[in-house]
Image (cartoon, helix red, strand yellow):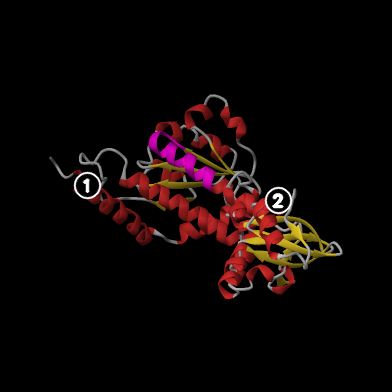
Amino acid sequence: MQNHANYAKEVFKIEAQAIQQLSDYLDNNFNQAVELILSTTGKLIVIGMGKSGLIGRKMAATFSSTGTPSFFLHPAEAFHGDLGMVAKNDVLLAISKSGETSEILQLIPFFKKQQLPIIAICAAVNSTLVKNADYFLNVLVNQEACPLDLAPTASSTATLAMGDALAMALMKARGFQRADFAQFHPGGSLGKKLLTAVETVMHQKDLPIISNKTEMEALINTMTKGKLGLVIIQENQKIIGIITDGDLRRIMRKKQSDFFQLKAKDFMTKNPITITPSTTIKAAETLMVKHKITSLLIAEADSLVGVVQIYQVA
């Protein structure tokens, strides 16, 4: 049986070298391309055919999600009506390994007539596409990972990496932050954490509340019934302390002989950390990690309204 993993390692080596080689090609074209996209009031239109088109779709998605409005335009569909999607002040990012893709070249006159700038991602410096482009990003590779040196593998990986480099440079130049990213990803875990308030996930019904005079047996029964691993101590409707199941285990070891003679006030944590209902899930998570706790009390004007726990925000 052949060791197919050995050839996989060779593929990784070839593609890694292809990406590393891109650094040698970077010149002022890259800087100018970034500045051009930053300055435009339109969108970044990405076009490409075949494998280049598939890479282009991913690029457009990355640009859009990191602060650069972008969409993918299929060259063949563009020639049959989708050019109506192109607007004044847009910028074209054309992807073609050979620089001679006919479906792309036939669109060049249209973009020239509209006076739209063209950025070419290409592996052929003397190609028709590069000659008609304003800026050229070179993605030449020494060889494909394909054993026949035919299927786009190392070249498509290099192209994708160049697109990522462009998107990340734009992202950094824009000062794009985590909160901005979350706004474009409200359905993702990061968006949820950064944009959603704890009031949407907090426990608020049948909370385990006791007084500071509650005796041990009643305290344990309330904690067990509450199923949150804690009890909250209140006085005159105000939070004055908290006892967790960890506190209970520690006091049990320390006060074995008179454990059941203790009351809540004897070992509660006074003035526990509280947050407001509008606190974001991410902020709550950060606070719990910082203080090495698993629960936070949620209060308004010192009055308890809920409890949020680490498993709800992780």
* Residue extending furthest toward the left: 1
Ranked by sequence position, the earlier of labels 2 and 1 is: 1
Is 240 placed left or right of 90 in the picture? Answer: right
Is 76 placed left or right of 298 in the picture? Answer: left
Residue for badge 2? 203
State yes or no: residue 89 in magenta: no
Q: CA distance from mark 2 to mark 1?
A: 50 Å
Is 266 placed left or right of 247 in the picture? Answer: right
Is 95 placed left or right of 37 in the picture? Answer: left
List x then y, in percent, for residue 98.
Answer: 35, 41
Task: Residue type at mark 2: give it.
Answer: His
Q: Tag 1's secondary structure?
A: helix
Residue span colored magenta: 48-62
Residue at point 20%, 41% (across, down): 147
Q: Tag 2's secondary structure?
A: loop
* Residue extending furthest toward the front: 257
